Image: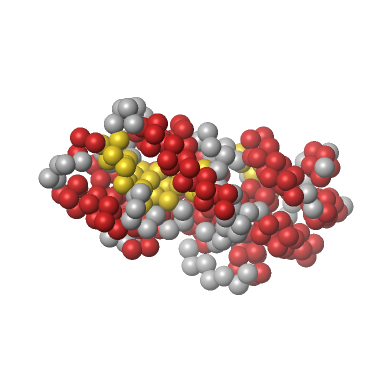
Amino acid sequence: MFFIYYEKMNSKVNYGDKPSEKEKHILIDIYKNIYTDFQKNQVDIFLCGGSTDEINLRNFLKENFEKYPFVRIFYPEAIFEDYFKINKNTDYLTLENWLATQVDFICIACESWGSVCELGAFTNVPELKEKLIVLNHENFKNSKSFITLGPVKHMEKQANNSVYYYNNSNKQEILRKLKAKFKDIATSSTNARDIYNLTGLFYFIALLVYFFKKISLVKLSNFVKYILIDYLKKDIKNFDTILSSTKKLLFNENFITRIDDQILITKKAELIISEILNKNDKPVYNKVISDIISCRY
């Protein structure tokens, strides 16, 4: 299998900053012949709800969703800090609306004032409303509150199976229904993620670090910029924001680690990527590895 050669590669390399012509060909190979065949066999979920430090429905969903290989969870607060450092004039609502466009589903557990505000905001955006899954406590099912008669009722009228009322005894049943829903979508998808989206770039960068073993922060930025802007001719107005947010997610998900100014793949990500690639072993894998080795000499 190709990863045997990968394990033997010497990691003591000091790459330059700008991609060479050889590296450009490698990047195109990784994108065109590997990434685009890297089928989207997961659903990406934006999970909103109560504090991650408390015992609540959001954490119950998190702990269970993370057991499913076809589900990947993203948390808005995980990238807020870096995002606001780059975008001084932005606001939480703009950021959350942007993040929500990057995922397949927005799952909101209505158990905090923040999550209630998110529900109200997302139901007013047509392209986001279609992605919403709302979980409201059964105690509020017949409530005359604005939330129940407003956003929740609106979602019940707009889409089937978009609102679930939970209690302590039916959480497992709701989880079973959501699991079936997500699995059906994940297994039926045959297309790769758009690389210029947050979730698409997540896997492309993971592939880059996987094959190159380690990449400097500057080199990584130039590699991604070359593929997105020079090769694919994408007009990426917020490139720094997307790249910074994606790296933050990769760190949070324990896909990459950092030693000085070098980015390295983690054992967790290495195993996940190897398993996916080995399902469809192709000669291009060894070609890419061979070309990377040749760049060192």
Q: State whether residue 110 is above or below residue 16.
A: above
Q: Is residue 208 above or below residue 48?
A: below
Task: Please indicate whether residue 106 sits to the left or right of residue 136 in the image.
Answer: right
Asked if one can make out residue 185 in the rendered structure from this viewpoint, the answer is yes
Residue for point 28% across, 54% down: 155
Q: Residue furthest left?
A: 144
Residue at image point 60% right, 72% down: 233
Q: Nearer the viewer, residue 246 or 275?
A: 275
Q: Position of residue 42 (x, y in %)?
A: 55, 47
Q: Nearer the viewer, residue 296 or 100?
A: 100
Total number of numbered discs in the rendering = 0
Judging depth in this view, the residue of 143 and 208 nearest the camera is 143
The quarter of the displayed image where residue 62 is located: top left
The percent coordinates of residue 229 (x first, y second) are: 60, 68
Residue 20: in sight, yes or no? Answer: no
How is the model colour-coded? secondary structure
Residue 207, image x and y in percent?
67, 50
Please provide percent x and percent y for residue 73.
47, 42
Residue visible at 71% across and 42% down in the picture: 274
The one nearer the camera, 48 or 253, is 48
Determine the residue positioned at 63% across, 69% down. 232
Tell me: 264 left or right of 249: right
Q: Quadrant of the N terminus?
A: top right
* Quadrant of the image occupied by residue 113: top left
